[in-house]
Structure formats: C-alpha cells, structure tokens
Amino acid sequence: MSTRDGQLALDDPHAVLHRGAERLAAHYDGIVNAETVERTVFESYAALARTAKVSVHLPSLAARFANERLTALAQSKGAIPKPVPEVLFVCVQNSGRSQMAAALARELGAGRVHVRSAGSEPGSGILPSVVAVMAEQGVDLGEEFPKPLTDDVVRAADAVITMGCGDACPVYPGKRYLDWRLDDPAELDLDGVRRVRDEIRRRVEELLAEVLPAPVAHGAGPTA
C-alpha cells in the first residue's frame, strides 16, 4: 500500500468508525451485542453529521456519543449499575441552556451525580457567549458538543429537565420531569446570558439538594 493509500485509509471516516465500534464492542462484551454497538456508532455519526460545521473530528465525537448511549442503554436494561443518580438536561439546540446546566451540575455534584445533555433539534456548536460566561466561572466547555436527544438516554435518566423543547422529550413512568422556563441565550446579550447562567446555577443547586442522598452524619450514635 502506498503512503497516499495509507493516509486515505487513516482519514476514511468509515474505517475510523469501524475501529471505534470494535473497541466499544470489546468494552461492552457480554453486555451489548456487537451488532447493536456498530449500529449505535454509525447512527451517532449520521446524527451528528446532520448539523456539524466541521467533520475532521466527527468520527471520534461519534464514538464518544455512542459510548454515552451504550452506557445509558445498558443502565436502562439493568445490565450495569447506576451508582449515582442520572440527570438529563434537554433544550432545543443543546448549545446553551442544557449545556450550562449539565456543566454546573457536574461541578456542583462533584461526582455524586452523573449528567447528560441533549437537544431536540441540536445546533452546530456551543454558543460563544455561553462558552465565555461559563469560562468566567472557571468552567471549560471546550470539549462539549451538541448531541441529539435519543430514547436510550431518556430511559436511563432518573430526572429529566427540559428547557423550551416542548413535547419533544418522550415520557416514561417512574421518572421525574421538570420544565425550567428560561430565556434562550441565543437571543440575549452577554449580560443576559450571565443572568441565565446564574439562574441555572440556583436551580441546579436546588435540584441536587433534592435528588442526592442526604450525607450520613458522623459520630451520631443512638439516643437513649
């Protein structure tokens, strides 16, 4: 094979996706069958490609997204445990409100909650104003990207928080649903986005106080 042929093989997104599917199939061996893994990887790639501005890193992003979906699928079927509560934040484009909420929940939850976010109509990237106001508080959204809402992540969630996406989110019994009415950062100036960020932080703090188990008091013994 020539160097050029080798480079083409390395750059071929389908080849990258197949390699990613093989790695994930090995990781989920005995939990999710290989056919489901491969289908999820290629479905994830197709879903992200519909809105992505650039495609150079798309196969690796698709593998990350597929991994999240496969974990959620396995959790919803009880094949792997959920050691902490699962919270899903959903807005329309997954480029503003739900991204801020997920990032703040990760920061404030400090490993005591697992967080996902998604969009009913995902955009092409995180809003620059959202990246800027989160950076002001030391939260880096540089590795995040809009993800479409999928059935598997809804099924795995214990609490689903929607923000302006209407009836797009499927409803399953036994889950907690909340609708946060918040202004869309895409329509606001920087100060407006800051106000939305601060309101989201307040609501996330309240949510975590409700969904997280109460800390065990140390040194407390039985009373006489």
Image (spheres, helix red, strand yellow):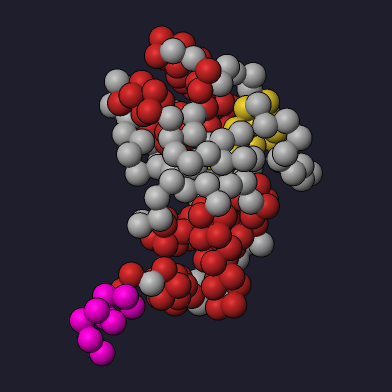
The C terminus sits in image quarter: top right
Residue 137 in the figure: left or right of residue 41: left
Quarter of the view holding residue 44: bottom right
Residue 49 is situated, as x and y percent measured from the top left of the image, at 51, 54
Residue 66 is situated, as x and y percent measured from the top left of the image, at 51, 60
What residue lies at 36% left-to-right and 36% top-to-bottom?
141
Camera sees residue 84: no
What residue lies at 41% left-to-right and 68% top-to-bottom?
13
Q: Residue furthest left?
A: 3
Residue 217 in the figure: left or right of residue 82: left
The overriding secondary structure of the stretch rendered in magenta is: helix
What residue lies at 57% left-to-right and 17% top-to-bottom?
183
Q: Nearer the viewer, residue 14 or 215?
A: 14
The N terminus sits in image quarter: bottom left
Q: Is residue 155 above or below residue 192?
A: below
Read off the magenta span. 1-9
Camera sees residue 7: yes
Q: Is residue 174 magenta?
A: no
Q: Is residue 171 above or below residue 68?
A: above
Q: Is residue 191 above or below residue 40?
A: above
Q: Is residue 55 above or below residue 215?
A: below
Q: Residue furthest bottom?
A: 1
Residue 195 is situated, as x and y percent measured from the top left of the image, at 46, 11
Residue 74 is situated, as x and y percent measured from the top left of the image, at 59, 62
Quarter of the view holding residue 197: top left
What residue lies at 33% left-to-right and 78% top-to-bottom?
9
